Image (tube, rainbow, N blue to C red):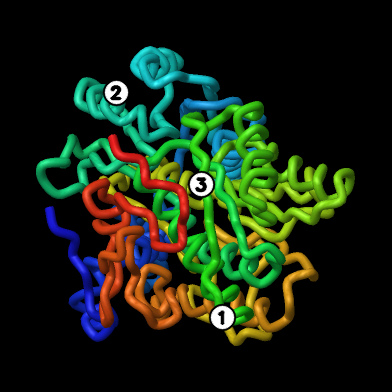
Amino acid sequence: MSPEKVSRRRFLSGASRAVVVGGAAAGLVIGGVGGYFAGQSTAPVVTKTETMAITQTKTIPPEPRGVKAGYFYPGPAKDYGWSYAHDLGRKFADATVPGSSSTYIELVPDPEASSAIKTLLDQGVDIVFACSFGFMEAMVEAARNNPDKYFVHISGYKSGAAPPPNTTTPNMSTAFAEFYQLYYLNGLAAGAVTQTGVVGYVGAFPIPEVVRHINAFVLGANATYKRRTGKNIKAYVVWINSWVDPPKAREAAIALIEDQNADVIAYTEDTPTVLQVAEEYTTQKGKRVWSFSHYSDMTKFGPNAHLTGQIVNWGPIYSHFYRMVATNSWEPVDIWTRLGDMTPWRWRRPIEQSLAGKPEGTVYLAPLNPAIPEEAVREIKQRYEEMKELLFEPFSPEGNLGEPIRDQEGNIRIGKGERADREFLWSDKTMNFFVEYIESPFPRG
């Protein structure tokens, strides 16, 4: 399959936007969910009373019912990363939709997904949320066998809304909260503060999600570092092949610091371990190292080493599905939220009013450390706001100082006038490379 690349002119046109911008399309759908409890999604009950020949019509909205939801996570609910963020989202949805409640199962390996689903269904839940890519096939089967229940798979691509050949039964949806834009912004911060010109990344698995985050981070770091110094950034990646493995994450972070001289380290591992290593080097070993939050605000684990980070609030997404079930208005959807989605004000703000570094929507930046130079802070806020209206895209020459994006062999992957679309970013046939500034070899399977 060849990646679809979209020119800036076509990208900004209405015809292209629906194809390229999964997040924006989701945002438009989601914008109406507040009206569910006002009876916008089900037929109202109309009653008439007559007094002195005057007919009065009163619309009575349908009475929403509480929802019983079941979740299962790949990691511990208190990992402070992926599973922890989902658990916070679960609690948010329970509190948002009146009368709702939920239950969850943690530490579910992929092969045990079917068993976890059965356990939740036996508890009488109305809707099941599966919070890992590896749970996809079990969810597809469960949705097919339980047409009276609802199923939402996080990070998958098979649903009742998906085009063939990934179309499933209509009681199954997919959703994801996307971070690559935030990783680019983290990179801008990294390139502005690094003293060694070397950044590192501790990666979980070499899947498109993680690869695009790595590439976005390095593109951002190179943008600010090269403007500062005239030199390209150097980046190294260490894979640990696990989502939750503090000992391996610690070992990888130390290797990046000691062996490669990295002084800013990003990561995909669902604990604060990498940030804690950065804190140890900064406060105990006399070497300034920076790191980030991941999924939740982890500042307290590295108060002297925390630069910023990527944070998610799954609550609005989960509440959206609760409301559809509660009001009998279910329809299968594929939600892909990015910056600006599920916010009261969808559009960009002036830099001086930017909420970058504060909670906003489903994905947002952790607090910005005052150590980030003011010029870089302004650029971070400008790009943060521009991405809300799709005026800036990291995976384009705009995100690479006007140059085409090349892989490690020098091949152009995204050329002048082009931007990556959702298919390009999600597919292992296209997001299968490292950008040229990464020194570590790309894993080939």
Q: Quadrant of the C terminus?
A: top left
Which residue is farthest front? 259
Residue lying at 36% horizontally and 37% vertically, measured from the top left = 152
Identify which amino acid the numbered label 3 is placed on: Val
Q: Quadrant of residue 61?
A: bottom left
- Residue 82, relative to residue 13: is it above or below? above
Q: Earlier in the sequence, mark 2 or mark 3?
A: 2
Position of residue 24 measured from the top left corner of the image (x, y, whole percent): 36, 67
Q: Report if residue 98 is visible in the image.
A: no
- CA–CA distance between discs 2 and 3? 32 Å
Q: Earlier in the sequence, mark 1 or mark 2?
A: 2
Graded by Cα atoms within 10 Å as few (under 14), some (14 to 19) or many (20 or more), the crowding at tag 1 reads few
Residue lying at 23% horizontally and 79% vertically, measured from the top left = 7
Q: Quadrant of residue 280?
A: top right
Choose between 434 and 372: the one closer to the eye. Answer: 434
Callout 2 secondary element = helix
Callout 1 secondary element = loop
Position of residue 109 measured from the top left corner of the image (x, y, whole percent): 44, 19
Graded by Cα atoms within 10 Å as few (under 14), some (14 to 19) or many (20 or more), the crowding at tag 3 reads many
Identify which amino acid the numbered label 2 is placed on: Ala
* Mark 1, residue position: 230
* Mark 3, residue position: 237
Q: Nearer the viewer, mark 1 or mark 3?
A: 1
- Residue 391, relative to residue 291: is it above or below? below
Callout 3 secondary element = strand
* Mark 2, residue position: 138
Position of residue 320 measured from the top left corner of the image (x, y, whole percent): 43, 50
Residue lying at 33% horizontally and 33% vertically, measured from the top left = 151
Q: Earlier in the sequence, mark 1 or mark 3?
A: 1
Residue lying at 59% horizontally and 73% vertically, measured from the top left = 225
